[in-house]
Amino acid sequence: MAGQGGSRAAPRRSRGVVISDDWPGYSLDLFTYPQHYCGDLEYVLIPHGIIVDRTECLAKGIMQDIGDNNIVVLCVLKGGYKFCADLVEHIKTLSRNSERSVSMKVDFVRQQSYHNDQSTQNMQIIGGDDLSKLTGKSVLIVEDIIGTGRTMKALLNSIEKYKPKMIKVASLLVKRTSQPDGYRPDYYGFEIPNLFVVGYALDYNEHFRDLNHICVINDNGKGKYKV
Ligand SMILES: O=P(O)(O)OC[C@H]1O[C@H](OP(=O)(O)OP(=O)(O)O)[C@H](O)[C@@H]1O
Ligand code: HPA
């Protein structure tokens, strides 16, 4: 499927799973997916089962680093909801079965900037508790994807003003963009090529959140759901 980050001796979360640019993906015929998306997808980039397994591994790393803490999990909606729900479940399971228990509060912020497959300048934080409640807290921000990194940088700027004790960021995906100053989260599942992907709550104009696998959308899909 992909190269893997670092050597055996390297820290566990040094690079995540790296999916190379020439990775052909899996044929859609090998998996089930909603028939209403038939003809709209190029291929499966990451099957659902692999996402779940990798998320469990990220939860283990997070527990090792920040177990025994009280943390506020800040889920970035809408795209982050699936990854956040699965990550929190894994952390809860690990916490139940370990000496080191982590107490979690979960909150949500909504930040939207994408129109079709393009990032826009219009970025707003909507919803969630008052961010001033994060003062002195250990915060784990959970996001689905880092693309240009603009969304995460803007969110971090807004949160840092309130002086939390600690901020860590977990993103399921990081895109390899051409930007030299691309943002790198503390934890991430997969580094992917610079392609527009959908599924597992990632959308194209609100479509495809109901697809389990992470797939590459094709031109037909982009045209059909363009706004
Ligand atoms: O690194 P960037 O290039 O800024 O892109 C990443 C952001 O884009 C997506 O959000 P989107 O604006 O599509 O909103 P959504 O989560 O509601 O789908 C995604 O969920 C990230 O928040
Ligand atoms: O590839 C993507 N898919 C969905 N949302 C996104 N936001 C940034 N990149 C993407």
Image (cartoon, helix red, strand yellow):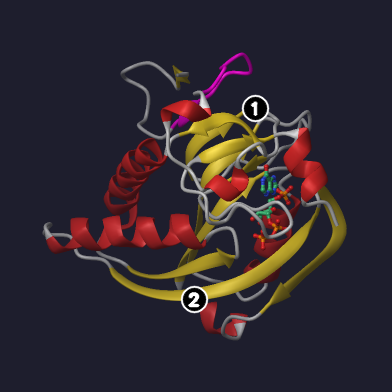
Number of marks in the rendered image? 2
Q: Earlier in the sequence, mark 2 or mark 1?
A: 2
Q: What secondary structure is marked by label 1?
A: loop
Magenta stretch: includes residue 22: yes
> Hey, which quadrant is residue 198 in on the image?
top right
State which region is magenta: 14-25
Within 10 Å of the Cα at label 2, are there few (<14), some (14-19), or many (20+) other Cα atoms?
Answer: some
- Residue sitting at x 28%, y 53%: 63
Q: Is residue 15 left or right of residue 101?
A: right
Q: Position of residue 28 (x, y in %)?
A: 51, 30
- Residue sitting at x 51%, y 68%: 74
Circle 1 is placed at which residue position?
193
* Residue 107: image tag: 2
Q: Is residue 134 left or right of residue 67?
A: right
Q: Nearer the viewer, residue 141 or 30?
A: 30
Badge 1 amino acid = Pro
